[in-house]
Amino acid sequence: MPPYDCMFLFKPHIKKEAILDLVVRVGKHVSGRNGVVTEVKNLGTVQLGYGVKKLDGRYYQGTLMQMSMMATPEINKELHYLNKEDRLLRWLLVKQRNTKFGLDVIEDEGRLELSKFSEISRLNDSEDEDEDDDEEEYQLEEEETK
């Protein structure tokens, strides 16, 4: 199952209980289709670049939530009932591309990148040797001042 991120932009006056109710309902929908909700984040109140016009007015700010999940590809069609949800200003489902999990993360390319870190640490070690010389200079200056 591919990973997805679902972003919800709620109207600013919606209470936390109502927001959680909708997020839980979507989570139950995903798990009912053999999917898994991996993370839910509340990103707080955000200022919008333009007003979103709805039947009850125009909104210039909203509460942003992010739900990360692993679900079947049909989830996009199944979530279209959110279009009729009056608590939402907007919602967006994004499929994560080129995401690797588990041992697939470390491949030949990954090992090469890890070897670069050891080269960097060797450079840092050689710089540390220069710092030792600086300490001797400070000791000489202290002796001269006495």
Image (cartoon, helix red, strand yellow):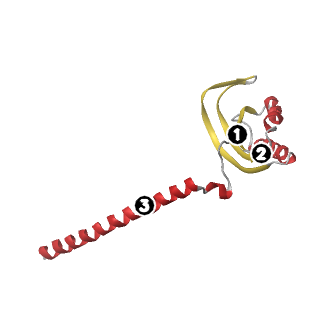
Q: Residue furthest front?
A: 108
Disc 3 or disc 1, which is closer to the eye?
A: 3
Residue 136: x, y in percent?
22, 73
Q: Is residue 118 left or right of residue 109?
A: left
Residue 86: x, y in percent?
79, 31
Q: Earlier in the sequence, mark 3 or mark 2?
A: 2
Residue type pointed to by label 1: Lys
Residue type pointed to by label 2: Leu
Asked if labels 2 and 1 touch by Cβ distance under 8 angstroms, the answer is no
Say what secondary structure mark 1 lies in. Answer: strand
- When the figure is inspected, residue 53 is found, relative to residue 79, above or below; the finding is above
| Residue corresponding to mark 1 | 95
Disc 3 or disc 2, which is closer to the eye?
A: 3
Q: How far is disc 3 from disc 2 in space, using C-alphas? A: 48 Å
Task: Determine which of the numbered discs, if any, sits on residue 20 in the image.
Answer: 2
In terms of image quadrants, where is residue 132? Answer: bottom left
Say what secondary structure mark 3 lies in. Answer: helix
Q: Nearer the viewer, residue 67 or 113?
A: 113
In terms of image quadrants, where is residue 131? Answer: bottom left
- The 10 Å Cα crowd at callout 3, few under 14, some 14 to 19, many 20 or more, is few
Q: Earlier in the sequence, mark 1 or mark 2?
A: 2
- The 10 Å Cα crowd at callout 1, few under 14, some 14 to 19, many 20 or more, is some
Task: Determine which of the numbered discs, if any, sits on residue 119 in the image.
Answer: 3
Q: Nearer the viewer, residue 43 or 98?
A: 98
